[in-house]
Each structure stands twice: as structure tokens, then as C-alpha cells.
């Protein structure tokens, strides 16, 4: 899997296959709401295992029952790559 930045057209194509993700400030971004704090934290733990399996670590933010995820590749100058799309797809399956 390439760590080369994707073009805006490639990112737009990838977003078609992703549920609820947007492209903002050179990142794939998604916010997910849960029933309560415990559910949100359980989701974060599951995301952590998926991210670690790819050796790719997202920016995660939690406020009570909401989790915001932001994905980009530091090795690619903070741009979106195929690694980010792959992780977003795995997160969507959780």
C-alpha cells in the first residue's frame, strides 16, 4: 500500500465508499455518536486495535458520547494516503 498522497479526485472517489467521512484540512474526518460514554470508549478501543494492526494511528477525540476521528499520514507530509482510506474502511466495519 502506497504512502504517497492521494489526489483530490482520488480522495473524492474514496469518500464514495466511506460512510459519513468528509475531507477537511488534509484529513479524512468522521464524527460518531453513541448512547453513552462507555460505548464511545469501547469504540475507541476497537479503533485502537485496528489502527495498531496497520501501524497507522489516527487522531481521536472524545467528548462524552461523541468520538471524532481524523486520518492522515504523517510520513506523507500530513496528507491523505491509501493507508488512511484502508483504516477508514476498517473503522466503518466496527
Image: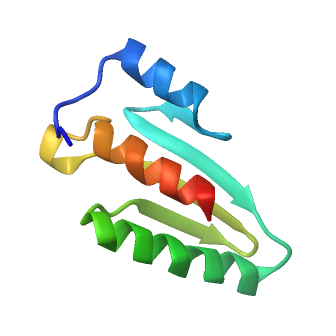
- Please tell me whether residue 90 is drawn above or below residue 25 in the rendered image: below
Quarter holding the N terminus?
A: top left
Residue projecting furthest to the right: 35
Q: Left or right? Give the position of 21 relative to 13.
A: right
Task: Indicate whether 4 appears above or below 36.
Answer: above
Residue 90, position in %: x, y? 50, 57
Q: Residue at x 53, y 43 (%)?
A: 29
Please give the name of the residue rendered at 30% of the width and 17% of the height, measured from the top-left corner: 7
Res. 80 image quadrant: top left
Viewer-proximal residue among 74 and 42: 42
Task: Residue 3: give x, y in percent of width and height.
Answer: 17, 40
Compared across the picture, whether 66 is left or right of 14 comes to right
- Res 35 quadrant in image: bottom right
Please state the horizontal and vertical placement of residue 48, each as a whole percent of the image.
Answer: 43, 75
Where residue 81 appears, x then y in whole percent?
Answer: 28, 36
Front residue of 58/17: it is: 17
Amino acid at each position: 500500500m502506497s504512502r504517497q498522497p492521494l489526489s483530490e479526485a482520488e480522495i473524492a472517489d474514496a469518500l464514495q465508499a466511506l460512510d459519513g467521512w468528509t475531507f477537511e484540512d488534509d484529513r479524512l474526518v468522521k464524527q460518531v455518536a453513541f448512547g453513552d460514554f462507555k460505548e464511545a470508549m469501547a469504540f475507541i478501543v476497537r479503533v485502537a486495535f485496528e489502527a495498531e494492526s496497520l501501524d497507522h494511528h489516527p487522531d481521536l477525540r472524545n467528548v462524552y458520547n461523541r468520538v471524532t476521528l481524523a486520518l492522515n499520514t504523517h510520513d506523507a507530509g500530513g496528507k491523505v494516503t491509501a493507508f488512511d482510506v484502508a483504516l477508514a474502511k476498517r473503522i466503518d466495519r466496527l
